[in-house]
Amino acid sequence: MAEIRLEGVAHSYDGGGTWALKPMTWTWRTGRAYALLGPSGCGKTTLLNIVSGLLTPTRGRIWFDDREVTGVPPAGRNIAQVFQFPVLYDQMSVYDNLAFPLRNRGYPRQEVDRRVRRVSGLLGLDEHLRRRSRRLDPGRQQIVALGRGLVRPEVAAVLLDEPLTVVDPAMKWTLRSKLKEIHRDTGHTLVYVTHDQTEALTFADEVVVLNDGEIVQAGEPGELFLSPAHEFVGHFIGSPGMNVLDGAVAGGLVRVGDAAVGRASGDLPPGPVRIGVRPEFVRLTSEEAPPGIAARVTGIDRMGAYDLVHAQVNGHPLVARTDAAAVREPGSVTFLRFAEGRAFLFRDAVRCGVVEPLPGSAP
Ligand SMILES: Nc1ncnc2c1ncn2[C@@H]1O[C@H](COP(=O)(O)OP(=O)(O)OP(=O)(O)O)[C@@H](O)[C@H]1O
């Protein structure tokens, strides 16, 4: 296993006209399970292929520990890669497919057998070991492909590119927890590409959020939810995503329209800001005491365990997640407060501060 370091890596497919990846410096630490999360076209596969050596970056350098591998082809990098669709030897048995990467590197027979059976047991393949892989359904074939990626102990990293796309939904949950178990067992460095926030948050030690060719934030799942560093992270993670209101900082206060909603943290220069707050951290009250902002309720989604209250604030739509069946009607006026430390200020989409309570205001 190796620490994988990208130094100013960038990639353009059209000679510098557009950049699929913008210059990034980033380290994948040894033994961690990462999710690389972002929408379609943000550059996830490009980044993965640069790590595996399928693609040479237009700019920058790549290091595996203290060995530079920028120009080294995949065979010289000792990476296991699992693709979206199964890549297997059709005519071989499941056992032989799983054994192939080990035999290819000269592992002794007993060791091959031990490792194949361990992975097969964890992935629920024991009863299929003797079958030809082409006789399996595509979902099961993909599980064998996963097994092939995970069977070698000494790889620098295992890269998984949307590996559960062809696996049926019920099986996905099981496989994700199996993957975590195998990760705990082997200590592989895993990079798991997905555009699905649930997959990313439930799988990874650390989620790396990619948008428009840039890493906009990386952190533990809870950190991305509670403390988004970029507007995109606020929108992309969470359901529904973070609310954003246009506001302004003047005289140290944060205002939405005429209402002061708090103080700006630090010495934020005056001027327009965007205020981001998740639905979970918007409180609704009937009291008109500062720092309440007046809002008109426009609709209520009863979700069973909770309600999503939709409101208009100073011309902006906003959603609050509240206790179920609170007595509120569309058309009524309510007052909003933000949970302390959970409303953030953004400029140019990047977090620049926090809304702090007004002196003497109710918590
Ligand atoms: N071989 C290629 N030639 C030209 N442009 C490409 C090529 N591969 C990818 N791109 C472009 O580079 C950008 C990043 O693509 P990439 O496939 O890395 O994104 P992604 O996040 O993996 O998307 P998806 O989730 O849809 O696979 C996109 O704008 C895509 O159109």
Image: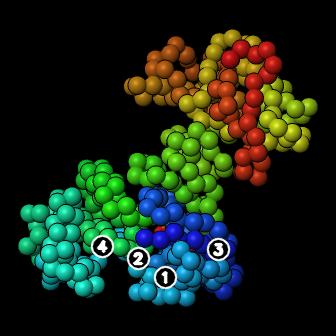
Left of 90 or right of it: where is 242?
A: right
In the rendered image, which residue does mark 2 sit on?
79
- At numbered mark 2, what does the secondary structure look like: helix, strand or loop? strand
In the rendered image, which residue does mark 4 sit on?
152
Tag 2: amino acid: Ile
- Mark earlier in primary sequence (2, 3): 3
Q: Residues within 10 Å of mark 1 (few under 14, many from 20)?
A: many
In the rendered image, which residue does mark 1 sit on?
53
The reply to whether discs 1 and 2 touch (Cβ–Cβ < 8 Å) is yes
Observer-nearest of 201 and 138: 201
Observer-nearest of 62 and 10: 62
* Cα gap from disc 1 to disc 4, whole angstroms: 18 Å
The reply to whether discs 2 and 4 touch (Cβ–Cβ < 8 Å) is no
Q: Residue at x 57, y 21 (%)?
A: 330
Q: Residue at x 40, y 80 (%)?
A: 78
Tag 4: amino acid: Arg
Asked if residue 109 is positioned above or below residue 207 in the image, the reply reads below
Frontmost of labels 1 and 2 is: 2
Q: Residue at x 19, y 63 (%)?
A: 118
Q: Residue at x 67, y 77 (%)?
A: 18
In the rendered image, which residue does mark 3 sit on?
7
